[in-house]
Structures are given as C-alpha cells and as structure tokens.
Amino acid sequence: MNVELMWKKIKKSQLLLPVVAMILVMAINIIHDAATGVGAFSFFKITLQQTTGNGTILYGRIIDILNRGSEAALLALGMTLVVSASAGTDISVGSVMSLSASFCCMLLAGYGVSSTNELAVPLIVGLLAAILMGCVCGAFNGLLVARFNIQPMVATLILYSAARAIGLLLCNDLIVYVRNDSFGFFGSFMGPIPTPIIITAICIAILSLILKKTALGMYIQSVGINSRASRIAGLNSKMIIHLAYIVCGLFAGIAGIVASSRITSADSNNIGLYLEMDAILAVALGGNSLGGGKFSLAGSIIGAYTIQAITTTLYALGVSTNQAPVFKAIIVIIIVAIQAPPVKAFVRKRKLSKTSKGVA
Amino acid sequence: MKSKKLNLNSHTILLLITIVLFIVLYMLGCILYSKKGFTHLQTFLNILITNAGLICIASGMTCVMLTAGIDISVGGLVAMDCMMLAVGINSGIPAPVMVLLVILTGLVFGLMQGFFVGYLNIQPFIVSMAGMFFTRGMTAVISTDQVSITKDTSPLYYAWANYKIKLPFGGYVNNKGVYNAPYIRINVVIALIVLIIIFIMLRHTKFGRSLYAVGGNEQSAAMMGLNVKSVKLKAYVLSSFLCSIGGICFSLNTMSGSVQQALGLEMDAISSAVIGGTLLTGGVGNVLGSFFGVLINGTISSIVKTNGKLASSWPNILTAALLFLFIVIQSIFAAIRSKKIH
C-alpha cells in the first residue's frame, strides 16, 4: 500500500520526466561503454589529472557535462522565470549573451584592439559592464512585454536579431582576444574544479534562496496563472513580469562572461548560437508548462544538464556536431508528445477500458 | 458595428504605413546613391530577385501566423532543400524530378508539423523548433560539404537559374553606349504567382477565411462548425509547401547547398510579416503587407551594400529598429481599440 502511494506520488511529480530522461541517457552510456569494452561505468569515473602546469584538475565525463552545460543551465534559470511569469519565451538570450561577451571584451581590450594580453580597464569593470548590459537588454524586453503588452516572442525577436549585430559593431567586426589569465579564470579551473560549475552553483543557490525566502516565487507563479486576478489581488503584475525579464537578462550576461572567458575571446557570431533553444528546451524538459504558471527550478536545471548529457553522449557515439540536431529534434518531439493532452487522454481511455474489462 | 469599422481602418493604416515607409526608404536610397545606379529599375528588380525565396516563405509564414501559430523551421527547410537539390542534381538525377521531390518533402514535413500542432495540441514554437533542429541536422546528414551545381553537372538547372526575362521598358544606356534592358529571373515570376494566389486565397476562399477565423478566436471558430484541427494542419502544410518553393527560388540564386545556408531566415520571414502588419496573436494580417515587409528588408540591405563602407551588421540593426517601431505602433493601435470597445 505504502509503496503504491509513493509510486503514485512519484508519477505525479514534475521531476519525473527530466529524471527519467537523465537515467535513460546514463543507461545508453553504460550500454555503449560496456559494448565498446572501456568498462561499463566509465561514464561515472572521475579522476584527478595533472595539468601541464603544476595543478591537478578533476577529469571525467560527468564533470565535462556539468562544465559544458553551465551556460545552458544559467540561461534556463532566467528562462524558467520568464516562461512562468509571462507565458512566453525569451528568444533573445543567446544574442544577449553574445552582446555581453562582446561588450566585456571590448572594454577589457579597448575599442578597435583585436588581441591583447594586458587589460585596458580593471577586470571588475568589464565584468560588471557585461552583467549590466545583460540587465539593460532584459529591461528592454521586459518593458515591451510588461508595459506595451507585446507578445514575448515578438518583443524578444527585436534583440534576437539586433543584439548580436550590435556586439559585432562594438568589436569592430573582429574577434577580440583577451589573452589574460585573470579573465580566462572564469572559463577554466578554480583549484581542481572548473570555475563555470562553481559560478552556476552559486547562481542556483542565490536564486533558489531568494525564491524560497521571499514571496517572489509565489508572486511570479500567480502572475503567470492569471495576471489579471493577481493584479486585482494587489500584486503589481507588470512590475513582476518586468523583473523576471531583467533577471533573465542578468543570467544571460553572466553566461556571456563564462562563454567568452572559456575561449578568452568575444566571437560574436558563435557565442550563444542556438543556446536560447537549449534553454527553452530545458524548461520544457523540466516538466514546466510553456503556458506559464507553476514552475520548478530544479526541473529546469536537470533539464539543462540532460540536454548537455544528450549532446555529449551523441558525440561519444560518434555523431558529428552538425548532425546531432536530428537526434535532438526526435527527442524533443517524443518528450512533448508524451506530455500532450490528447495523448494523455488517449492513454487514460485505454487504461479505463482495460480496468472496466477486468471488472466485467 | 462601430468597432468593426475602426478595426478595419487601423489595419489599413498599418498597411499604408508599411507601403509609405518602403517608398520613403527607396527614395532615400535613390537620393543618396543616384550616381551608383540606385535609380535604375534594375536595382529594384535585383531586390526582387534576391528576395524571391523570402517572398514565398513570408507568404507561408503569414498564413501560419494568421492561425496564431509560428513556423521557425523554414530556415532549416530551405537549407535542406538547397542541399537536396545540389546533391541530387550533381549525382545525375534530372532537375525536374529533384524539384518535385523537394516539394514532396516539404509537403510531408508540413504534414508532420501540422499533425503535432493541430491534432496533438503541442505549442507551435516547440514543434517548429524541433523541425528546425531536424532539418538543419538532416542537411548535415546529406552532406557536410559546400556542394555547388555547375553548368557541367546540370545544363538544364544552370539554364533555369540564368534565364533572363527581359522587360520591354525601363532600360538605360550605359557609358559605353550599350542599351541594357532590365530583366527578372524565373524565381521572381514564381514568387509573384505565389503571392497573387495566396492573396486571392486569403480573401476569397473558404480556407482563407477559416484561417482568419481560427486565429481570431479558436473557440468561436470551433463553435461555428469549423474543423480547427484540420485548418491548423493545412496551414502548416501550406507553409512548408511554400517554403519548399521558396527553397527552390533560393537555390536558383545560390546554385549550391551548405549547412550554414539560410541561417536566421526564419526571423527575416517573421519580421517581414510583422512589419507588414500581421499580428502574432493571430487573426489579423495580409500577405500584401508581408510582401512590402520583405521589400523593406531588401531595400535596407541594398542601401547598406551600395554604400559599401557600412559594417555588415547594420541591416540587422536597422531591421530590428523598424520592427521595434512597428510593434510599438501596433500596440498603440491595440490600446486605442480596446479603449474604444470598453
């Protein structure tokens, strides 16, 4: 009885889907590793490796997934709030990431300089500027969505096409290299652990703390479920939607810093390309409705890492970078199709008819 | 009754603004670059030639957007079409067969997307995002190289791509004293035919009107007795079909296929439709507006190209600025309308 109850609870849980997806990915990895004879559990193996310097770093596929998935996870955090509050997606985050990265590198290198070892301004100025740029972009999106009542997708379409272009303009159409260890730190290692993992962990901790300790999370959900009713209940709906977009922009800015620090350059054309899709996918995979309302931050985060795990697994299976999207598309369709109301209704009907037959 | 009249007016005004804006932009180009040949009729025709594919795609996008949907898979589908054409023709399959095959692929692809959106009730954005991933990935599966169609591999396709339809008016005599007749290419003819057919379809056929009805209010459309699911399915089939035709027009221009082709084309199509006065909330829009939206996009990039000194990112920024302008105007109109109704 107790087990049955628990099973029912698990079945209803929002986290079921992302967790099952994650387990499936792991299973595929284990089978593949066993089949190729590298040891069934090499997926989970984490070793300490000597670097060319005198440090040791953590090494392993899980670490790699956590590391590479940082940007998507950061974006997914903001995207979850945006989706929840405004029932729409922010498709500009990838471009905003690129713009923040370009702005940061442009400041650090000085305008028009394409490669430098020395920082033109203190590092902190560049970082703050990048985060500020993210916030400004988020505020612009929020202004259009919350104040002008424009559909989120159309509103963010503006920055989707403009932000990357402005970033290119800031960098004078060049790829700006900032070959400086203090800047490269954010994309490399802090002790044995990759810095992006630490940054993401801090961001997740802060955001979930804010959502737990204050009523903000509840406000966002209530605005997403019914913005008019929340307004009548005394919430400033517009303000809350605006805030969600600003937070989303903030995380895009941080993700931009991580992404550009990883390659110690601002490659406007490629930073954050298609990452908005990954972020939206992470939110959907996390069991969150794209129609707004209730959200689960944990689901989105697991979703983001699951996507990265899928990508890494595909590469491990020998699928090329360009061909990987085919599998991604099939996975997306399967995931959303299981969740689709008509399919669920069909399954329920089948079950009902089965049980009624059993009774008869 | 009164609100209906106002409704009609504000949409006509939006369309008029789009057309006026296009004329102003074009005049600006003529004044700034009259010495570089911007005033010749051929400049305008070149805009048509380069954007013939986009006109088809934007027409399809308008139909989908009328049902309150969206189709962001078009860029990927165009890339896949171009790649299919390039690889197929190079491997010796006759060009007409390949063209039919591409159109067939578009129909099947549209059927899939339409089924997921219409019958399984999945958000259009997610479905077409999966479609985008799928088509881009399939392009790479077909070939990861840059494949070109040359005169040697297919004389027929080469002839199609280079056939000039000369116009009997508007030519000019260049400084060597040779008369240059203005010309268009086959893809322009295809695009204009598509445009006219879709225009008539949206105005005068049952299917066209039901697109507006479904987008305007799905529930009342269903209560009226429309088969909402089937209308949605057909809208996506139409979009992918037109996108395939657009892909062929595109291929006639580029004569090649590559994974990186038509990147961001979906956003060009969407922004053209929005600038042309189509609302993403559905039920409002006109394919003529989208046509002018495409022309505005084309004029901007033509001006930037003629200038030659401006950075390549300017067309994107200017288009985004225009998009911003139009969205704000639309929202002001919407605010006025809702005030009048209440």
Image: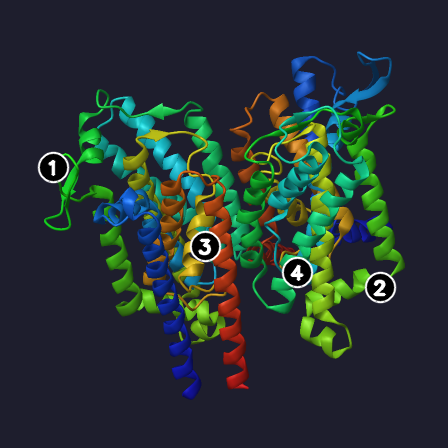
Q: Is residue B245 above or below residue B97?
A: below
The label on residue B177 is 1
C-alpha distance separating marks 2 and 4: 20 Å
* Front position in the image: A2 or B335: B335
Query: What amino acid is at disc 3?
Result: Ser
| Location of mark 2 (residue) | A215
Are dots 2 and 4 on a single chain?
Answer: yes
Q: Residues within 10 Å of mark 2 (few under 14, many from 20)?
A: few
C-alpha distance separating marks 4 and 1: 58 Å
Q: As drawn, is B99 to the left or to the right of B175?
A: right
Residue B200 seen in render:
yes
Tell which subunit mark 4 falls on. Answer: A
For marks 1 and 3, the one nearer the N-term is 1
Q: Identify the image quadrant of residue B20.
A: bottom left
Q: Is residue A321 above or below residue A303?
A: above
Query: What amino acid is at disc 4?
Result: Gly
Tell which subunit mark 2 falls on. Answer: A
| Location of mark 3 (residue) | B271
Q: Residues within 10 Å of mark 4 (few under 14, many from 20)?
A: many
